[in-house]
Amino acid sequence: MAPHDTDYQIFDKSGDVLETGGFTYAYPQHLAPGQVGYFADETLIDGAKPDQIGKVEADAFFSEADSAEATTFEFDRIKVIREEFSDGYVVSGLITADQDTDSAAVAVLFFGSGGKFLGFTSTN
């Protein structure tokens, strides 16, 4: 299945909407029955601090996809290295596809102990 028309709302602790938006990418873009995927997006809420966020709600709608549409990627030699001049990280690796591909959106999702989501980085 392929996602489309996905959106989200971010609420403060009193239930007021702080931000709305739409997801640009889903990882992976095509899901087989029972497969887990992730939506990722970046936003800046002017003046809001993380402890003010109450909840995030997301809606996703899917459509059937032909399995021929899906490209299979393999990832190898993935490295996560702390940047020298900031608090960030650099992710590198080798990606190969099972068919010719004009472009791809790639994301690395970071999880802490217990599976808690920490953040992500992405590129085209």
Image: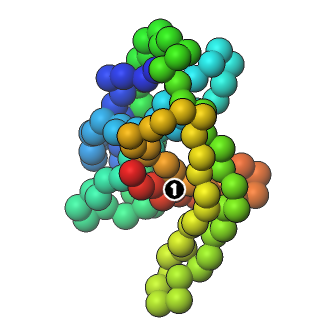
At 37% from the left and 64% from the top, the residue drawn is 49
Residue type, mark 1 in image? Phe
Q: Is residue 47 left or right of residue 33?
A: left
Q: Is residue 87 left or right of residue 33?
A: left
In this view, the residue in front, 9 or 97, is 97
24, 42: nearer the viewer:
24
Up-down: is 112 above or below 65?
Answer: below
The x, y position of residue 97, in whole percent, is 57, 40
Q: Residue at x 42, y 55 (%)?
A: 123
Q: Helix, strand or loop at disc 1?
A: strand
Number of numbered callouts drawn: 1
Q: Dot 1, how many residues are within 10 Å of its Cα: few (below 14), some (14-19), or many (20+)?
A: few
Residue farthest to the right, as pictured = 114
Q: Nearer the viewer, residue 17 or 59?
A: 59
Q: Is residue 124 left or right of residue 109?
A: left
Closer to us: 61 or 49: 61
The answer to whether 48 appears left or right of 57 in the picture is left
The picture places residue 11, in percent across and down from the top left corner, at 36, 42
Give the image location of residue 52, x and y in percent.
Answer: 39, 57
Q: Residue at x 64, y 30 (%)?
A: 36
Location of residue 35 with respect to 53 vertically, above or below: above
The residue pinned by badge 1 equals 120
